[in-house]
Amino acid sequence: MLLRERVPPPPPAPTPTRGRIAWEIAIVLALGLGQSAVYAIVALVYRLTSEVALADQTATLNPSRSDREVFDLIYQLLGIAFALAPVLLVGYLLWSPRRPHLASLGLEGGRFGRDAGWGALLVVAIGLPGIALYLGGRALGLFVAVDPGGLGDHWWTIPVLLLAAARASIQEEVVVLGYLFARLRQAGWGVWPIIVATSVLRASYHLYQGPGAFIGNLLMGLLFGVLFARSGRLAPFLVAHFLIDAAVFVGYPWVAGMWPELFGLPTGASG
């Protein structure tokens, strides 16, 4: 009779040191949102030093990437796919062999209906004040004119815009809320320093839209951070972010056509 060898389970992975966590965070951010923040700061300096007033400039959120339709579609899909690489990286870094595998990111199964409902409520809480802030900021010259409809009118435009909204939601919330909260806690940070730091990061990579965008996204980050620290569930914020961006990307051209004096782009605006 053959004896079955009993293999002991592998030892738990050691908690990374603070230095290793710092390097890991720096690498993750350099691959995505941190890089975007640096470019956004440079873009803001460029805009503020331009001869064109800030209120007469535009920021195109989803620009066309080619004058040939099929290649524009290919480039759009490639850009969305590669932008999610940092998300795959943090999922790999925080993967747990036990279910739920991504619990440390705040991703757990079940309660999707409730999470979606909370996400929809967040849209209401953020959407209307966000519109008021944007219009007030435009009047004060704190926002550039945001043009989310840089793509041409193709059969694939709306699906690609919805994919872009999903990409923004997944990339930002998984990294800013899920990953950074988990790693900074391991590094010994308190809850409020984490909330403030992640909110400043969120606001920084929106600076290309002007100083007003920094204020608006800072407030949004603080709200998301407080609620995420209390709930520990990421799904409501994924839903809320997707719905907000989908409404902006797809609905903005219609709204601008209905109320061009409020939402329309300035004549002769520069990007």
Image (cartoon, rainbow, N blue to C red):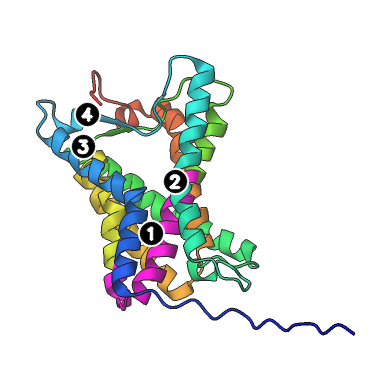
Res. 249 image quadrant: top left
Cα separation between marks 1 and 4 = 29 Å
Q: Earlier in the sequence, mark 3 or mark 4?
A: 3
Dot 4: element: loop
* In the foreground, 207 or 213: 207
In the image, the segment drawn in magenta is: 167-195
For marks 3 and 1, the one nearer the N-term is: 3
Q: Earlier in the sequence, mark 1 or mark 4?
A: 4
Label 2 vs 1, first from the N-terminus: 2
| Amino acid identity at mark 3 | Ala
- Tell me the quadrant of the picture where the C terminus can be found: top left
Mark 2 vs mark 4: in front: 2
172 relative to 205 in the view: left or right: right
Identify the residue under disc 1. Answer: 176
Q: Given the image, on which type of amino acid does mark 1 rest?
A: Val
Looking at the image, is 173 positioned above or below residue 13? above
Quadrant position of the N terminus in the picture:
bottom right
Residue 177: within the magenta?
Answer: yes
Q: Secondary structure at mark 2?
A: helix
Disc 1 residue crowd, few under 14, some 14–19, many 20+, Cα 10 Å: many
> Is 189 on the left-hand or right-hand side of 233?
left
Q: CA distance from mark 2 to mark 1?
A: 11 Å
Q: Which residue was labeled with disc 3?
A: 43
Contact flag, marks 3 and 1 (Cβ < 8 Å): no
State which tag comes first along the sequence, 2 or 4: 4
Identify the residue at horizontal 27%, vertical 47% (top origin).
37
Q: Which residue is mark 2?
A: 168
Mark 2 nearby-residue class (10 Å; few <14, some 14–19, many ≥20): many
Q: CA distance from mark 3 to mark 4?
A: 12 Å
**Label 2 or label 3, whichever comes before in sequence order:** 3
Q: Where is residue 176 shown, x and y percent of the image? A: 38, 59
